[in-house]
Image: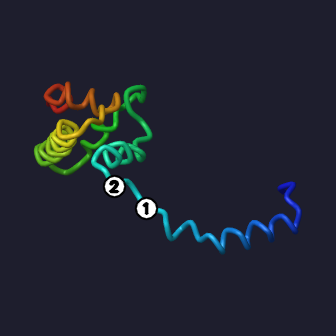
Amino acid sequence: MSNISDEERERRSVRIHETKPWLKAKGAVTVEGKLISCQNAIKHGRRSQNPVIKMMVYAESWEQEKARIREIVLRQKDAYSKSNAKPNVFWQEAIDNLDELLAD
């Protein structure tokens, strides 16, 4: 239970409904912002026992999955090359070691 009094809770409720911050909220707009935010869902990367890219290989067709992964990584590489954003460690490793990651 929080230490906020009923009066304070009511005051905050009134204020939030007056300002309606959810109407002004928006996601990333710039390419750089989108490149950064697209990494939010990555929970495991360099330090995980099975890196994310390698975990994606459980598809029925390994060749189709490799093509899909290659497309994702190359699209990300292209987006980084067109922006000022620097790839995080996960994407940099995937870009640098793409062929090795997708080796049979």
Q: Is residue 89 left or right of residue 76?
A: right
Query: For numbered disc 2, what is the local secondary structure?
Result: loop
For the C terminus, give its image quadrant: top left
Instruction: Find residue 78 and report its image quarter.
Output: top left
Q: Position of residue 4 (x, y in %)?
A: 85, 58
Q: Nearer the viewer, residue 48 or 80?
A: 80
Q: Is residue 93 left or right of residue 6?
A: left
Q: Nearer the viewer, residue 86 or 54?
A: 86
| Position of 11 relative to 97 (above/below) | below
Per the image, the residue denoted by label 1 is 26
Q: Position of residue 86 (x, y in %)?
A: 30, 32
Query: For numbered disc 1, what is the local secondary structure?
Result: loop
Q: Amino acid at mark 2?
A: Val
Q: Amino acid at mark 1?
A: Lys
Instruction: Find residue 49 and report its image quarter.
Output: top left
Are the residues flagged by discs 2 and 1 in contact, CB closer than 8 Å?
yes
